[in-house]
Image (cartoon, helix red, strand yellow):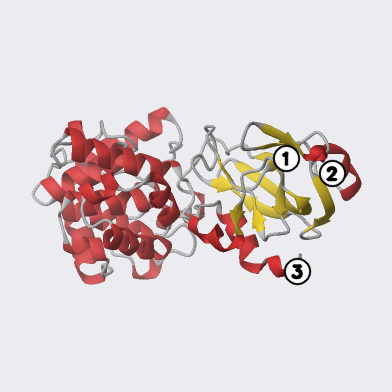
Amino acid sequence: MLNFSKKLIDWYLQNKRALPWRSTSDPYYIWLSEIILQQTRVEQGTPYYFKFISSYPDVKSLADADEDAVLKLWQGLGYYSRARNLHATAKKVAYELGGVFPSTYTDIIKLKGVGDYTASAIASICFNEVRAVVDGNVYRVLSRIYGIDTPIDSTSGKKEFKELAQKLIDIKDPATFNQAVMEFGATQCKPKNPYCLHCPFQTDCVAFQQGRIDKLPYKEGKTKVRDRFFNYVILITQDRKTVLSKREEKGIWQGLYDFPLLESTKDLDSKTFSKRVKDFSIIGIDGPVLFSDLEVESVKLGQIEPIIHKLSHQRLYVKFWIAKLVEAKGLQTIPFTSFSEFAVPRVIDRFMETFDFEDY
């Protein structure tokens, strides 16, 4: 194909969006933007980028932050391991590397939470290293233009696309090339309804010429989704307090706070829940406290149908059960008014936005 990189960069210079991190080559800001944009749309991630650079203008301020504060700022973005890794890497750079980011791909990829794509982006944009980025956008652009059927989720596919991208990259301006191919995939060669009629590669694009735009890129297998049933117990005391605890175990939402959680293998109706909750233990001041040992005035379902919360590999069916207590002996409680200070999963935050404690 005649000068792929020139066509691509020409398109980019005329069509690129004015994104805040494109006005800098500071590795802290590029790294921050890349971590935020992992599995997140630009429209959703941009406000978070501004919140982070406002709260933590440099790597040292982020490193010195409390993890709970970082998670609270991240709340709503999902994939919270990114926030924990972000904080861990900030500490490493600030405390072990003298506040100076590594300047080569080889060293950048050693940082926690940084993979090939992010390391390539930082190395090329900040340090002009000739390292091609390959993400979902790049897979889509290259598979369509070059008509590549190799599954992008296979080992051979990942290798093939990486080698092709590395072959195509503009060695004189790798930073612009990488940003161009990502932008092209995000705004022009989109997953659905791409702008083929106004595409600079239309006459060269194999997928367009063969009518296979909707068939590429090709994936070998689909991700298996696991169904889980969450029953949150919102305890309400007479002095207007409730119970939150931090999720310490590894898995979804590690480091976030949530209400006492009773997980079941299927959806529970009120009768079944009442039986199951008797043996349910809640983290207390001096150890576990059985729900059946609490003086409970009433238990009411917060909503009739479960809230369905979709994650990448899991589908959660979430119910909120409101338990009004006569007293909360042995429990560690917090005032309702301080609830907003804690980083909680988005599904809880959304429920609480419409929940009125005054009704109970």
- Measured from the top left, where is residue 52 in percent x and y? 32, 58
**Would you name the residue on which mark 2 appears?**
273
Q: Residue at x 36, y 57 (%)?
A: 185
Q: Residues within 10 Å of mark 3 (few under 14, many from 20)?
A: few
**Would you name the residue on which mark 3 appears?**
359
The CA distance from mark 1 to mark 3 is 23 Å
Label 1 vs 3, first from the N-terminus: 1
Residue 199 found in image quarter: bottom left
Q: Is residue 52 left or right of residue 312?
A: left
Q: Is residue 349 visible?
A: yes
Q: Amino acid at mark 3?
A: Asp
Q: Is residue 184 above or below residue 82?
A: below
Residue 260 found in image quarter: top right
Q: Amino acid at mark 1?
A: Leu
Element assignment for label 1: strand
The CA distance from mark 2 to mark 3 is 22 Å
Q: Quadrant of the C terminus?
A: bottom right
Could you say which disc has been placed on residue 209 in the image? none
- Measured from the top left, where is residue 8 in percent x and y? 23, 58
Element assignment for label 3: helix
Q: Is residue 47 left or right of residue 110?
A: right
Along the line of sight, the residue nearer the viewer: 3 or 209? 3
Could you say which disc has been placed on residue 262 in the image? 1
